[in-house]
Amino acid sequence: MSISQAIEKIEAQYAHQPEFVQAVKEVAITIKPLYDAHPEYEALKIFERLVEPDRIFNFRINWENDQGEVQVNRGWRVQFNNALGPYKGGLRFHPTVTQSVLKFLGFEQIFKNALTGLPIGGGKGGSDFDPKGKSENEIRRFCYAFMRELHHFISKDMDVPAGDIGVGGREVNYMFAMYKNLTRESTGVITGKGVGFGGSLMRTEATGYGAVYFLESMLVTQKEDIKGKKVLISGAGNVSLHAAEKCIALGANVITVSDSRGTLHDASGFTQEKIDWLKAQKEQSKPLAEYVDIFGGEWLAKQKPWPIKADIIIPSATQNEVDEDDAKQLVENGVKYVVEGANMPLTAEAINHIRLHQVHYAPGKAANAGGVAVSALEMSQNSVRQYDTFEQVDERLKCIMKDIHDSAAEASEQYGQTKNGYIDYMAGANMVGFKRVADALVAYGILN
């Protein structure tokens, strides 16, 4: 079965899972030169095997709210592929979580993890539980209940979850406590734990910082400098604010963050003081709009950041937040670099448009791999019962992100996707990640 036939099969079989189909097609259309050069992939049906998860666990979570009322949520763990190592991928708590969303995230995670060069496979999980508006006690009770179900399917050498949207250090710590209580083991079964009891320094900053390190490599390749560049960032969570923080430290002018209510625009640029204020505001679940009363700027209610003129955008909120109309606006405004801090924040149509106009584009599986890379470093630290310093982890992260950039650029060149100096990072990253997993599967025969 050819790649195009495999896509048709996926579209027919999973028409009810649009996010998953979108992710599969994005990989499929870019790996054809690699696939054609390796007939053994077709002989062993590597692509067809990779688009089907090894297994999916679906479970019910019962918990009690503060009024003593029983609440029921759905939970999943998608163990997609472990050819390179234990399944690794975050847990997402959000009302939009479905099996389709988790399959798309898990599929992307396979190649993202492969790109890091570290021995980790791909997986994803989560629940349709909404942490917003819940009390501390309710969140703790839900996390305990969630891990009561999840613990049957994970271990430090089989499947190692982490955090994601709606799951930060607090939630990870609650789940880790329940895992220890149930199994009577203290292992590195989940990453993102608190520093001092199993967590790694710099895990909080890793995804945002890593995206900016990837951006730096892109700029160096084009003989440009980040200093003075105007940057639009969407979202105001962990990835967004740390990406902003690192951009500012390197001399860029970050002028937006956003949330579901609108966009905060500060034309004078954010400073570290302002970013610290935003972090505190988000931790207390207070409105971003209050920023204007203290620091000035403007609050653009129910608006995205993308109409504002800038050199670089780092979409870091959620999937499909940048559509084709947004992409047209970005091109018209002269944006030169798009770096995905979130997973698949651009629609397929938006990606096609910016690539057509040769906007330098870093896909999420490459650009935001810093988070899972440091999670894997946390696993290593847990295994040897030692902690690395912040500086040691930061240096490892910089090297990993540069290696991801360079390998994607080299693959783009090798397979004829670089044209007139324009590097196709999407094709390059997909081919590098796919080849690493595919070669392992070929070596295993048909047992993985």
Image (cartoon, helix red, strand yellow):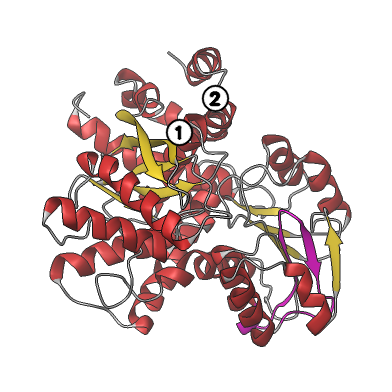
Q: Position of residue 92 (x, y in %)?
A: 46, 47
- Residue shown at 50% from the left, 39% from the top: 128
Packing grade of label 1 (10 A; few <14, some 14-19, many >=20) is: many
- Give SS at disc 2: loop
Residue 115 against residue 375 in the figure, above or below:
above
Label 1 – label 2 distance at C-alpha: 9 Å
Look at mark 1 in the image and give the residue it sits on.
103
Residue linked to disc 2: 17
Q: Earlier in the sequence, mark 1 or mark 2?
A: 2
**Amino acid tagged 2:** Gln
Quadrant that contains the N terminus = top left
Q: Position of residue 116 (x, y in %)?
A: 38, 56
Residues rendered magenta in the picture: 248-270
Please check the rendered image and state whether residue 36 is part of the magenta-colored stretch, yes or no. no
Q: In the rendered structure, which amino acid carries the disc numbered 1?
A: Lys
Looking at the rendering, which quadrant does residue 59 occupy? top left
Q: Secondary structure at mark 1?
A: helix
Residue 51 seen in the figure: yes
Where 83 sits versus 358, above or below? above
- The residue sitting at the left extreme is 184
The foreground one among 312 and 187 is 187
Residue 250, picture quadrant: bottom right
